[in-house]
């Protein structure tokens, strides 16, 4: 379906279908996860409620210009029945016309006014406010433009905007998107009206920073997000040593313009040099290469030496170490240091959401999934930052096999940060578990600047190509990826052979042997865990789950030397991995990952049962 026509909102049996936002809400206003194809099928149903729709008509509209089997439509209908809570034998929503098609029988009403969308939601959560008009006092602070003539001062421009968000977020009565929402527009030419619509704010604050000698000038302008016209502007010129006072004054002036009151930022460091060191480090952590993270760690240690009571410096140091683990950078004692600094930050200031999010990440690395869940829940309670939703889904929820649980929160987060590539990629991976329509979100992430050659893009596009039986395309995507595996001698030949074997034009046992030889080349330094997950999937797809388990065991042995179980185990729950999950060795593998205590408390993975410490797949 290329264009969604008709009214923007439909209601039926307590459900609300928001067509333009591509969201379905239940009667209690919770998002209901649907694959893109199932969503489009539902739109067609409600648009023509009561009509009998031929199977051929449905398939032509939902899969335009694509040849699909009738079973694809049957799967869509089954997913819709489950999502709507229709039990076997019930026909409250969808009635099958044998041999012909389907009829949507629930009473449907079109909602014409925006007020109906907000009915009973108040200011609520992002999920509840989806589609609502922006609060009167709401503002998005964009990254400030660096006009100093010195690219090395980019950290200062970002830091001033970041600090302004931090201060204004504490002003009662003011709605302000989190940093990850507004900074997603950095480096992009997007108008204030579009930003206002996407982030649901009335005003957009733009700014620039100039410097000359020991003086700094910050110029800001407030733009009406509905009209696109400037409504207020001001310049502040101070000595650099008065940076703290400048930031407080800036926050007060913005709040005063919005007829609100801002208190001075009480948790700003007392030592200016320590503060500048922290800003420099934050800028590096947000561009997490190995060199950047090592430099950030050194800067933060210097900042802490000068100001040992600055909780945010400890929080960012913990995050820098955690990133080293996430990206597999060889930094000694990274896990221990991440945990130690996170605990210090939490003791100094338990209100810092970043700290609890880091503890959530570290819990996944330790295989302590209950502690991880608690960390993420605390972070999201303290700050509605959509980045935490992405982290939790990618590192925690998908890893434990709760795929259906991940999607609603991610889509709700996307309503507050539609340009955040981390969310788009998390949604793409979630959809990849069940539906090949992950491509739409992957392509959108690429259009926003995500390189196609960096993880996880090559693997994501390869999986989509395999499912479409385009095996040469899959090989090209993988061989163009950047990483230790693809840079290993012989990798291109092994990957090409593997894709040919999956396509039926080469021998599968030969492909397994070629991959095994490639794996052994990685062994001297311990198998690369990122490569390991690829190999586990490829071995399984080639029909060698026992070889895949050998590889997985070696991977966990490598992780164990670092005191972790690794991160982001979503690959385990892909449909292609079912032979790996049903293999007798999977029970032991799940035990080593630490899943059972979490499954006992929160339930087993989707489509499975967990009894007496044993997982049974349906």
Image (cartoon, rainbow, N blue to C red):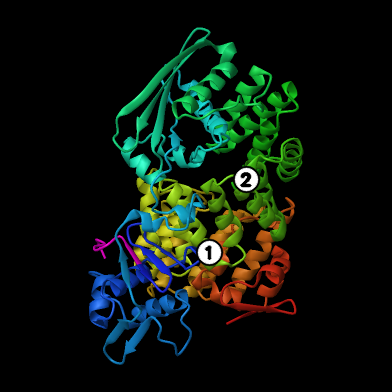
Instruction: Look at the picture and state if 562 lies above or below 59.
Output: above
Measure how far apart labels 1 and 2 are at the Cα level. 46 Å
Instruction: Look at the picture and state if 585 lies above or below 491.
Output: below
- Residue 2: give x, y in percent of width and height: 25, 62
Residue 612 inside the magenta-drawn segment: no
Q: How many marks?
A: 2
Residue 2 inside the magenta-drawn segment: yes
Start-end of magenta stretch: 1-10
Near-viewer residue (501 or 229) = 229
Q: Residues within 10 Å of mark 1 (few under 14, many from 20)?
A: many
Near-viewer residue (161 or 261) = 261
Q: Are marks 1 and 2 in contact (CB under 8 Å)?
A: no
Quadrant of the snapshot with the C terminus: bottom right
Instruction: Look at the picture and state if 267 lies above or below 557.
Output: above
According to the image, label 1 marks what residue? Answer: 515
Q: Quadrant of residue 8?
A: bottom left
- Residue 292: give x, y in percent of width and height: 57, 33
Mark whose residue sits in front, 1 or 2: 2
- Residue 275: give x, y in percent of width and height: 63, 23
According to the image, label 2 marks what residue? Answer: 382
Q: Quadrant of residue 613?
A: bottom right
Q: Residue furthest top?
A: 213
Q: Quadrant of residue 556?
A: bottom right
Q: Main secondary structure of the magenta part?
A: loop
Residue 156: tell me if it is visible. Answer: no
């Amino acid at each position: 379906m290329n264009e969604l026509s008709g009214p923007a909102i439909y209601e039926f049996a307590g459900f609300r279908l928001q067509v333009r936002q591509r969201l379905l809400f239940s009667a209690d206003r919770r998002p209901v996860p649907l694959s893109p194809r199932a969503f489009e099928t539902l739109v067609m149903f409600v648009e023509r409620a009561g009509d009998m729709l031929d199977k051929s008509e449905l398939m032509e509209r939902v899969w335009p210009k694509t040849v699909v089997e009738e079973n694809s439509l049957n799967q869509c209908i089954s997913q819709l029945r489950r999502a709507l809570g229709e039990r076997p034998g019930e026909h409250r929503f969808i009635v099958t016309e044998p041999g012909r098609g389907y009829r949507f029988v629930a009473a449907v009403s079109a909602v014409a006014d925006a007020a109906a969308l907000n009915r009973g939601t108040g200011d609520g959560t992002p999920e509840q406010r989806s589609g609502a008009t922006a609060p009167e006092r709401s503002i998005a602070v964009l990254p400030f433009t660096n006009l100093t003539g010195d690219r090395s001062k980019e950290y200062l421009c970002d830091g001033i905007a970041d600090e302004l968000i931090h201060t204004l977020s504490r002003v009662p009565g003011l709605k302000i998107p989190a940093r990850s929402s507004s900074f997603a527009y950095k480096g992009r030419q997007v108008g204030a009206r579009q930003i206002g619509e996407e982030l649901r704010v009335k005003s957009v604050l733009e700014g620039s920073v100039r410097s000359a000698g020991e003086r700094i000038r910050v110029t800001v302008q407030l733009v009406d997000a509905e009209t696109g016209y400037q409504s207020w502007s001001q310049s502040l010129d101070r000595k650099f040593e008065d940076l703290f006072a400048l930031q407080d004054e800036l926050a007060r002036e913005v709040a005063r313009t919005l007829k609100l009151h801002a208190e001075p930022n009480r948790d700003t460091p007392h030592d200016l040099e320590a503060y500048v060191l922290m800003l420099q480090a934050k800028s590096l952590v947000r561009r997490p290469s190995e060199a950047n993270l090592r430099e950030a760690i050194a800067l933060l240690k210097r900042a802490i030496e000068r100001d040992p009571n600055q909780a945010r410096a400890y929080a960012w140091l913990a995050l820098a170490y955690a990133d080293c683990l996430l990206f597999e950078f060889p930094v000694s004692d990274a896990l221990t240091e991440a945990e130690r600094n996170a605990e210090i930050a939490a003791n100094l200031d338990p209100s810092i959401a970043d700290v609890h999010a880091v503890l959530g990440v570290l819990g996944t690395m330790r295989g302590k999934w209950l502690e991880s869940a608690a960390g993420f829940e605390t972070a999201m309670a303290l700050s509605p930052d959509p980045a935490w939703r992405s982290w939790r889904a990618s590192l925690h929820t998908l890893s434990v096999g709760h795929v259906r649980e991940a999607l609603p929160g991610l889509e709700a987060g996307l309503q507050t940060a539609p340009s955040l590539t981390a969310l788009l990629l998390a949604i793409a991976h979630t959809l990849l578990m069940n539906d090949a329509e992950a491509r739409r979100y992957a392509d959108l992430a690429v259009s926003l600047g995500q390189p196609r050659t960096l993880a996880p893009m090559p693997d994501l596009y390869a999986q989509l190509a395999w499912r479409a039986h385009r095996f040469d395309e899959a090989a090209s995507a993988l061989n163009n990826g950047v990483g230790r595996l693809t840079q290993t001698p012989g990798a291109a030949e092994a990957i090409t052979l593997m894709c040919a074997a999956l396509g039926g034009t080469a021998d599968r046992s030969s492909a397994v042997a070629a991959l095994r030889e490639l794996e052994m080349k990685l062994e001297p330094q311990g198998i690369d865990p990122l490569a390991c997950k690829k190999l586990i999937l490829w071995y399984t797809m080639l029909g060698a789950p026992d070889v895949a388990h050998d590889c997985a065991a070696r991977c966990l042995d490598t992780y164990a030397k670092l005191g972790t179980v690794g991160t982001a185990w979503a690959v385990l729950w892909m449909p292609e991995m079912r032979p790996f999950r049903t293999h007798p060795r999977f029970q032991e593998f799940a035990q080593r990952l630490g899943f059972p205590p979490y499954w006992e408390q929160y339930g087993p993975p989707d489509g499975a049962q967990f009894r007496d410490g044993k997982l049974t797949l349906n």
